Image (cartoon, helix red, strand yellow):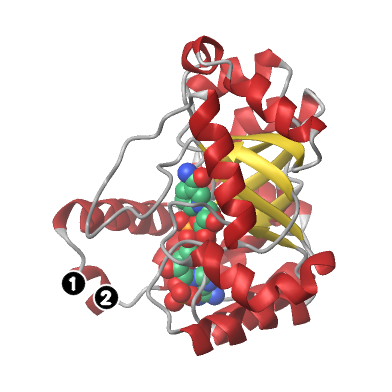
Amino acid sequence: MMGRDLDPGTAGKLLNAVLDAGINFIDTSPDYGASEESIGQHLSGRRREFFLASKCGCPVGDAGEGARREHIFTRQNVRAGVEQSLRRMKTDHLDIVQFHASPPRSVLEENEAVEELKDLRREGKIRFLGMSGTLPNLTDHIAMGVFDAFQIPYSALEREHDGAISEAAAAGAGTIIRGGVARGTPDAPEERLSRLPEPFRQMYQQRRNRWEEAKLDDLLDGASRTEFMLRFTITHPGMHTTIVGSANPAHLADNVAAAAKGPLPHDVYEEAKTRLT
Ligand SMILES: NC(=O)c1ccc[n+]([C@@H]2O[C@H](COP(=O)([O-])OP(=O)(O)OC[C@H]3O[C@@H](n4cnc5c(N)ncnc54)[C@H](OP(=O)(O)O)[C@@H]3O)[C@@H](O)[C@H]2O)c1
């Protein structure tokens, strides 16, 4: 759940709709604006209904207007962040805490950051150790053998981490796939793309081109592009769960319906991968 400016009423309705729809895994971060406070405000009474994942190493306290602050993986900042998340979300434990921003193994080791998470686990404040990891550091993270779960970016249109997902799963860790609908790019109206700032517009355009070049519309069989994307993501054999961001209740309902259809048929999945390679 990324930080977006939703009024409290809208955020409350959306968060409750997520649980009502049967979703039982919520991912957040101290970096996502008012997200943690919203979860505390609207879902603390339903805490037993979902697994709660947040991040650590993030700046602690108020970021201030437009601030972009550095991630710090000292024992002190890791602990302060987790304790802040517990307070904000009005809970006594987090199910997974993930190091944010894929720090190098050397930074984690110099700071004894993993040891701090283990201390927090011994104290019952967290249950599982996680990493929000990307290549190249992700290879080291998997080799460290200490992480219970990895959050990894992946979609049909961004398959750079395809092999890393399989490696993490083969190592016995849980995998949490993010970005699995490529931010809705294939279905986004041209007019919305044209309003994006230049670096984003280019990135979205590249994804869109990849979709067109692979002629994936031929494989839709009546599905929307986003439905196809989501089902492609959950078909990855190393995927254990996926987190889709949305501030739109209609999209939430569509995504739940798409996920309920399950993985893509084998021949469609193989054909899509061939076309995307
Ligand atoms: N480094 C990290 O750890 C990190 C980084 C990025 C994200 N994350 C986590 O991963 C989650 C998802 O990532 P993400 O938001 O970047 O990627 P995403 O889930 O691929 O994309 C979310 C975007 O897709 C749109 N969307 C969702 N369902 C749609 C549908 N059915 N039709 C059309 N558009 C649809 C949403 O717009 P609407 O609001 O209009 O539905 C939103 O703009 C985040 O909420 C966060 O928890 C973690």
Q: CA distance from mark 2 to mark 1?
A: 5 Å
Question: Could one spot residue 37 in this view of the protein?
Answer: yes
What residue appears at the point 45 percent right and 35 percent down from the top-left corner? 101
Q: Position of residue 148 (x, y in %)?
A: 76, 32
Count of numbered tags? 2
Q: What is the secondary structure assignment of the residue under circle 1? A: loop
Residue 205 lies in quadrant: bottom left
Q: What is the secondary structure assignment of the residue under circle 2? A: helix
Residue that numbered label 2 is attached to: 192
Asked if disc 2 is less than 8 Å from ligand 1, the answer is no
Q: Position of residue 45 (x, y in %)?
A: 76, 76
Question: Could one spot residue 225 in this view of the protein?
Answer: no
Q: Position of residue 141 (x, y in %)?
A: 61, 20
Asked if disc 2 and disc 1 are in contact, CB closer than 8 Å, the reply is yes
Asked if disc 1 is less than 8 Å from ligand 1, the answer is no
- 101 on left or right of 118: left
What residue appears at the point 35 percent right and 59 percent down from the top-left corner? 208
Say which amino acid is labelled 1. Arg
58 or 22, nearer to the observer: 58
- 163 on left or right of 71: right
Say which mark, if any, is on residue 203.
none
For label 1, count other residues whose C-alpha is less than 10 Å away and answer few (under 14), some (14-19) or many (20+). few
Q: Outermost residue, left direction?
A: 198
For label 2, count other residues whose C-alpha is less than 10 Å away and answer few (under 14), some (14-19) or many (20+). few
Q: Is residue 248 above or below residue 149?
A: below
What residue appears at the point 45 percent right and 66 percent down from the top-left corner? 34
105 or 254, nearer to the observer: 105
Q: Locate the N terminus and report the quarter of the image it occupies.
A: bottom right
Residue that numbered label 1 is attached to: 195
- 179 on left or right of 188: right
Say which amino acid is labelled 2. Arg
Residue 258 lies in quadrant: bottom right
